[in-house]
Amino acid sequence: MTTKLDILAVGAHPDDVELCVGGTLALEARKGRRIGILHLTSGEAGTRGSAEQRRSEAERAAEILGAAHVEFLDFGDGAFRTGEAEEEALIECLRRLRPELVLSPTPADRHPDHARAHALVRDAAFYAGLARRGMGEPYRPAAVFSYMQHHHFEPSFLVDVSETWDTKIEAIEAYESQLYTPGGDNEGPQTKISTPEFRASIDGRGAHFGLLINVGFAEPFWSPTPLAVADPMWLLPGGIR
Ligand SMILES: [Zn+2]
């Protein structure tokens, strides 16, 4: 039986999670928290690299971030399916892995797979808590927060990931087939994600959100509900002291 997770980060495609929450996951793993990564597809519709290659890259990236668990589902990259069968598969995962916190794709995005994946994760997290839905012991994660992809939202909170930014970049660079890597072969058809400009934009976005809270790099999150805090002093710049 799989040991209970603290955090499960769910992505529509391999590399989504690393790009958006790699710093946060590495930070939490360093604190001893049990991190899981669930890729809802193997990225088989991607322009560069085979699904098999992306799977092994995803496993390597998870290892770099310090994840305790990595798993793949097959919901159809580029024609992302969301129906009862996909909900059931996700409910089974949530009941088996029992994460306290789920990190989900963005609510609205240029890539239809991302917004569909958001709705699927949100719904499955709710249904997983209902006794009359599906097999297994009912379990509902305490919260589902969204990370930022192409579409910008007003963040509910920012996580200072300055100390794990290098680890995040290392995890992203594990996806050799997808991204521009300085010194890499960079062969194959060019996609937006494979350009040096995209690579620079990762640092740019992290630095932009970092600047808003006076740190080097930060990752933005959105919560659908107001956030409860036991002590407002935790919300002072610099966070918990
Ligand atoms: Zn994606």
Image (cartoon, helix red, strand yellow):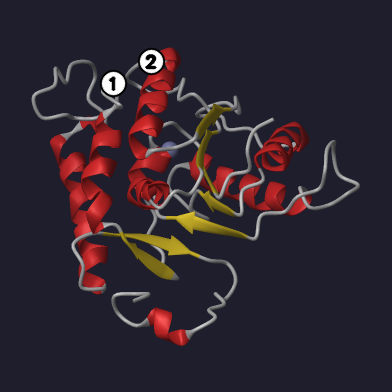
* Picture layout, residue 176 above or below residue 193: above
The residue at the point 53 percent across, 28 percent down is 41
Position of residue 159 in the picture relative to residue 185 (left or right): right
The amino acid type of the residue labelled 1 equals: Ser
Q: Nearer the viewer, residue 118 or 164?
A: 164
Percent of width and height locating residue 190: 22, 25
Q: How many marks?
A: 2
Percent of width and height locating residue 20: 37, 48
Percent of width and height locating residue 203: 19, 50
The amino acid type of the residue labelled 2 equals: Gln
- Give how far apart the Cα atoms at labels 2 and 1 are: 8 Å
Pointers 2 and 1 in contact (CB under 8 A)? yes
> Looking at the rendering, in which quadrant would you find the C terminus?
bottom left
Label 1 beta carbon within 8 A of ligand 1: no
| SS type, badge 1 | loop
The residue at the point 19 percent across, 60 percent down is 207
Position of residue 45 in the picture relative to residue 26 (left or right): right
Label 2 beta carbon within 8 A of ligand 1: no
Residue reaching furthest to the left? 183
The residue at the point 13 percent across, 21 percent down is 184
Location of residue 95 by image quarter: top right
Q: Residues within 10 Å of mark 2 (few under 14, many from 20)?
A: some
- For disc 1, the marked residue is 177
Residue 155 visible within the image: no
* Picture layout, residue 231 above or below residue 139: below
Location of residue 98 by image quarter: top right
- For disc 2, the marked residue is 53
Quadrant in which ligand 1 is drawn: top left
The residue at the point 66 percent across, 54 percent down is 141
Location of residue 170 by image quarter: top left
Tell me which label, 2 or 1, sits earlier in the chain: 2
